Image (tube, rainbow, N blue to C red):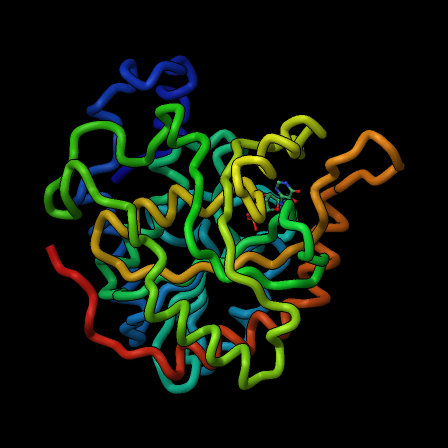
Amino acid sequence: MVDWVVFDDLMKDYTMLDDIPVTSLPRHDDYQRTADWLLSHTKQRPLVGIICGSGLGLLADTLKAQDSFPYAEIPGFPQSTVQGHAGRLVFGELKGRSCVCMQGRFHMYEGHSLCKTTFPVRVFKLLGVETLIVTNAAGSLADGYQPGDIMIIKDHINFPGLSGLSPLNGPNDDKFGPRFPAMSNVYDKDLRCLAMDIVKQMGLSQFVHEGVYAMVGGPNFETVSEAKLLHRLGVDAVGMSTAPEVLVASHCGLRVFGLSLITNKVVRSYDGQDQVNHEAVLEVSKMRSHSLQLLITQLVGRMDMNNNTHF
Ligand SMILES: O=P(O)(O)O[C@H]1O[C@H](CO)[C@@H](O)[C@H]1O
């Protein structure tokens, strides 16, 4: 079993990707062992996996017939350290459909390697999950987005990925997916259309957009110049997570749907006193998490099942 304390100790001296000691990366058996432990501790057989963003963990509390496990009790599971990320894996039903929910995710800026931040996604795959729903708190760059709005993620720009930081670095495990996965249609179009339909029926169209999410490394929020750059590049919302999870999910054939809750406007001017902070992010997340929960519940209830790609 991968020992994350030993792993982190090994990794701390390796800043260049081509230096990562291959033998210390998690192997298929490590993911399988964690999945087997979970399958032997719950009767749920989830088809949908959900990752809750900052302040969005309340969604997990709405699952019916729950079995929940603190990350510390799950063999091989990493631990979360960020406020607003409870650190529990919750199994249960939404609209009668079996789901597994991460109440708390792992971020690169916590000091985790990317294969560690995405460890649960491959465990989900081995549990039988077919569809991954990712949620996050994000700052908006798009004109017209307001704090409290929801963005259906159409596509992403993975800045750490563009500069060589990928959870798929290292030898490829063909049991999970191909060496060179395509990413051109990574956020499932049918699910995005279905979500838009639900939004209309819920009367939320005014608050819901479809747009491009960019992942930056964090943990600092953006400078004004960085914000201007992101805006010019066509980024609608920015955060410090999601892209690696989506990459790993898509690599192993999971269907992906993503939502950003806009918690703040990214400051794009030197005038004024506006400053974003994590407490404000959590406050807005909590305020609007109910609409997000309703949207996800409806989506899970209406999505078709048993149609993901198998390698
Ligand atoms: O992406 P999630 O986990 O929702 O969290 C977002 O909120 C935190 C900043 O307030 C960062 O971690 C950012 O990525």
Along the horizontal axis of the image, is 279 left or right of 19? right
Q: Residue 184: x and y, percent?
A: 29, 48
* Residue 103 appearing in the image: no
The residue under the point 36% across, 57% down is 187
The residue under the point 80% across, 38% down is 275
* Residue 206 appearing in the image: yes
Q: Residue 164: x and y, percent?
A: 35, 24
Q: Which of 217/229 is in front?
A: 229
Asked if 178 appears above or below 11 in the picture, the reply is below
Q: Quadrant of the C terminus?
A: bottom left
Quadrant assignment, res 270: top right
Asked if 157 appears above or below 135 in the picture, the reply is above
Asked if 163 appears above or below 200 in the picture, the reply is above
The residue under the point 61% across, 32% down is 219
Asked if 95 appears above or below 161 in the picture, the reply is below
Quadrant assignment, res 205: bottom right
Q: Which of 143/226 is in front?
A: 143
Q: Quadrant of the N terminus?
A: top left
Q: Which of 72/186 is in front?
A: 186
Along the horizontal axis of the image, is 99 left or right of 171? right
Q: Which of 251/113 is in front?
A: 251
Along the horizontal axis of the image, is 213 left or right of 130? right
Q: Residue 96: x and y, percent?
A: 38, 86
The residue under the point 29% across, 19% down is 20
Along the horizontal axis of the image, is 269 left or right of 26? right
